[in-house]
Image (spheres, rainbow, N blue to C red):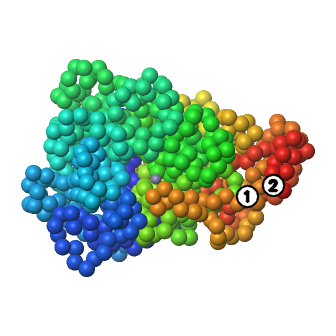
Amino acid sequence: MIQPVRMNNVKILDNEILHFQKNTISYLLSLEPKKFLYEFDKISGIDPGDVTGYAGWERSDKVNFRGHFFGHYVLALSQAILMVDDKVVREKLVSKLEDSVNGLYDAQTNYAKLHPESAGYVSAFKEIALDEVEGKNIADEDKENVLVPWYDLHKILAGLLATYTNLKEQLPEISSKALTIARRFGEYVYNRLIQLTYSDYMLKIEYGGMNDALYQLFEITLNAHFLTAAEYFDEVTLFESLAENKDILSGKHANTTIPKLIGALHRYVIFTDQELQNKFLDTKQQTKLMMYYQAAKNFWDIVVNNHTYINGDNSQEEHFREPSALYHDAEELDDGQTCETCNAYNMLKLTRLLFTISGDKKYLDYYEKTYINTILASQNPETGMMTYFQPMAAGYTKVYNRPFTEFWCCTGTGIENFTKLSDSCYFKKNDQLYVNLYFSNELQITENNLVIKLRGNKQRNQFDLTVSKLDSHKPANPIQLYLRKPNWAGSDSALLHNGQKLESSVNTDGFWQISDLAPGDEVKINFAMNLNVVNAPDNKKYVALQYGPYVLAGRANSKIEQQNLDHPGGVLVRMAIRDDTFPRTITSEVDFSSWQRQVENEAQIDFASDNLIKVTLPHIAEDYDFIPYYQVYKSRYGVYFEWQKAGSREAKRRRMKLE
Ligand SMILES: [Zn+2]
């Protein structure tokens, strides 16, 4: 199988991406493990002293998700430690992680002393919350008001497993302690679940990636208890429908569904090892294994082809809606609640894993699109705070979390996203190196004694790739380079290997292949960028623009908005408010296909603006400037607009509505 190159082997050199990472690391350092541990301590009979807990989704007095953010926090710390060069900052991060893991260890140990029958439980809420999931009657005054308890527990488990995996070499002590907590917790889960008379209880309420995390725990330990526990969280009937390629997603909560398929795929991947398969699966289970892969593959195709906006994200009001109804969802339902950012985080995890199995370039094209246009797009570069929803319709702003009083799901996945920005840049299989993302970075390949430097200009997508030895005294092993030819790259794209133009015949399955790349070699990469009009499947005149890999957002003026940006909704979430005076249209004098040609041929691209690029469209009535969507913050924008012909019936109707 192809393997992702570990993120700590890739040094980010792109200043903008480094800035995003720096912001998140500052945010991590501003948070206190003790305050997160407050609820864990209370539950496990440890006196928290004069510490107080955090508010927002971590609160305990009203509906809450307590514990969830702490899991993300632990996970993000374990990644940040890998990514940071500055010794002082690294020490601070390590100390936060140690406090966190030690705190969880103590809470778990103490809980086991008080409740030996529940040894292994480690949580910010009482077990009663899990009893409730299992349909037991709980008196109102005893309820914990935890909306999705297994979801919260999954985050803790995932944080511990990431700490174990990421820091095995760097911090062996803390790494193995994290695994100990995870093992004990896994045993608790196993003991709890095997007592169930009706095994489907947990499938009814969002549980994040419990199956995925337990499969991972099984993969690490090869303890069959964890395999059994993981299987309790597999929604096999869902997988079977998807394996039959049925789009049954309409009405399903997107971020509940996506992780289930990551778990399904993880099961498949583990048991591609024939020995493990023979040891742990019976014949029937072995026969059924392919179904899990088929389900994950089909699910990905269905989501990406039928439910995904131009930025790579999906959903409206957190749910999948009817297939291919993007215009209806973004514009007619009209509430700024498209594209929950968590969904893209989870789709990228699924995508990464699908690529490692199949080597199919379509997964990497999707990865790049979503990485730039949803993930990078989710952070406010000034404050480092992150989005929940990302409105696709015109007239909204992006709404970012508050640092200490909200702790949304998307802030949790957000701190993970921005501490793994070099993850999935490269993939490797033996001596084959796949290049996925194009921004300035440096890759070290110890086993081949090579350093690959990619430097260049992401504004124009022109890069130089150079190769040198990592240790000049030792021999180097050449590699086979597979450069992804992006699906947006125009026919003028060119590659020069040591000054020689590579012919397109070298192109294999969408990759440019260079054999025996060795120290001293140089590759010049020039991807031709075009401006394209992309439309919604249910309304060809609902249009968005993309220049090269960059989705564009149109701003009607540069005024910085301060008021009426958002309103409260859901559990402590805030949604953007649309400004009805913001134009939603693109009005042209010519018909649609001529306009499209005009845009593609006559639009002005300004490379000297404050943003990466600025695009001005020819011959339209409205006054917009288009900049990369990922760089929009503060101002109102539109990604999609309703195209209309000047003087047409729709144009008159819309104008009357406004007046
Ligand atoms: Zn979310």
Q: Which mark is residue 143?
A: none
Q: Cβ of disc 1 within 8 Å of ligand 1?
A: no
Residue at left offset 26%, top offset 43%: 134
Residue 2, visible in the rendered structure: no
Q: Quick one: 346 or 54, which is closer to the camera?
A: 54
In this rendering, position of residue 71 left or right of residue 468: left
* Left or right of 438 in this view: 296: left
Q: Residue 611's image quarter?
A: bottom right
Kindly identify the residue that appears in the image at 25 percent across and 54 percent down. 139
343 and 166: which is toward the camera: 343
Q: Quadrant of the N terminus?
A: top left
Does 545 appear above or below 593? below
Given contact means CB atoms under 8 Å apart, are the residues at marks 1 and 2 in contact? yes
- Disc with the residue nearer the chain's start (1 vs 2): 1
Q: Position of residue 363 (x, y in %)?
A: 50, 37
Q: Which residue is mark 2?
A: 658
Percent from the top left, x then y, of residue 635?
67, 64
Task: Tell me the amino acid under the disc marked 2.
Answer: Leu
For image coordinates 69% across by 47% down, the residue present is 640
Name the residue beneath numbered marker 1.
580
Q: Nearer the viewer, residue 197 or 625?
A: 197
